[in-house]
Image (tube, helix red, strand yellow):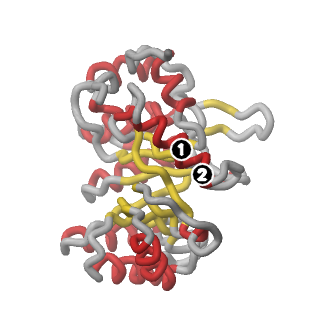
Amino acid sequence: MSTMVPPLYAGLVDDASLLPPSATGLTDAVAKYHEHTGSWYANLLGSLLLPASIVGTEPVPRLTAGVIGDVPAASLPVTIEKLRATGVVVEHVEAAVARRGEDPQPGLATLCSFAAAGTGLRLYAEIPLSWGLLSALDTVAEARAGGLSIAPKFRVGGLAAELFPTPVELAAVICACRDRDLPFKLAAGLRHATRHTDPETGFTHHGFLNVLVATLVAAGGGEVAEVAEALAATHPVPLVEPARNHRAGPRPLFVGFGAANVVEPLTELVRLGLINGGYE
């Protein structure tokens, strides 16, 4: 396997081509994922994300995947067992614990019970960036201290402006995870490497490189204002040098994010000179 992807970006991008609004079919998505994992940039990839709701609707081939829990939490254990029975190797499960504005604790309790059942899975609890967030992070930290393989996941975009946290708001979340020694995943809105405004919606999206550099700042002891400064950058210049300086080490805190087309973030990293590779 090629080593052209530096350790800082290893496993950064999950293949989310099966998730809405993508119209990619299962057969095509699996074939394309295998193509990616056989390429020179294979080390950039995390998991192929498989919606749990697909179980029972069409045959699922033997594959290795992360499962998105878009079914009721109580159905997840049965769904996972059905997938395993078909030869699917489940790497991890991601599931929402509450809607925005709801108490996340009941959903977290259900997911922690699932984690405690000895499934051997890594679980990511999708926690809304709203009321109850900090106490939910405390609960996740306590669960991890008790030996459970669970970590938070946050959505940083969506179909409404309020679903996009400001740089200061997201910086506070990153620092809260840092203070509790919690790795985290992100979903939604991370379309490009740097922070930008979508000309069609007017929504300002976070950049995945901004987040990566912000976590480097946080892991180095940076305060919320310093982390927010990295998140607010709309030009790659202040981001590229810190990323280059840390390219040989592991990525702190930020587990990764999903992209409908994994070649898009790859192309931006190559264009910025952060991954040295080429296309045939």
Verify CB contact (< 8 Å) between mark 1 and mark 2.
yes
Observer-nearest residue: 25 or 91?
A: 25
The 10 Å Cα crowd at callout 2, few under 14, some 14 to 19, many 20 or more, is: few
Q: Is residue 129 visible?
A: no
Mark 2 highlights which residue? 27
Residue at horizontal 34 percent and vertical 83 percent from the top: 113
Residue at horizontal 39 percent and vertical 43 percent from the top: 224
> Does 277 appear above or below 226?
above
The quarter of the picture where the N terminus appears is top left
The 10 Å Cα crowd at callout 1, few under 14, some 14 to 19, many 20 or more, is: few
Observer-nearest residue: 263 or 147?
A: 263
Residue 219 located left or right of residue 125: left
> Does 19 appear above or below 31?
below
Q: Position of residue 101 (x, y in %)?
A: 60, 72
> Does 113 appear above or below 249?
below
Q: Is residue 195 visible?
A: yes
Residue at horizontal 25 percent and vertical 72 percent from the top: 148
Mark 1 highlights which residue? 31
| Element on which disc 2 rests | helix
- Give the residue type that dot 2 points to: Thr
Q: Position of residue 188 (x, y in %)?
A: 59, 49
> Does 279 appear above or below 34?
above
Observer-nearest residue: 275 or 144?
A: 275
Corner quadrant of residue 115: bottom left
- Give the residue type that dot 1 points to: Ala
Task: Report how far apart the C-alphas of labels 1 and 2 lie in the structure.
Answer: 6 Å
Q: Position of residue 235 (x, y in %)?
A: 54, 20
Q: Position of residue 160 (x, y in %)?
A: 72, 53
Residue at horizontal 31 percent and vertical 26 percent from the top: 2
Corner quadrant of residue 239: top left
Observer-nearest residue: 44 or 128?
A: 44
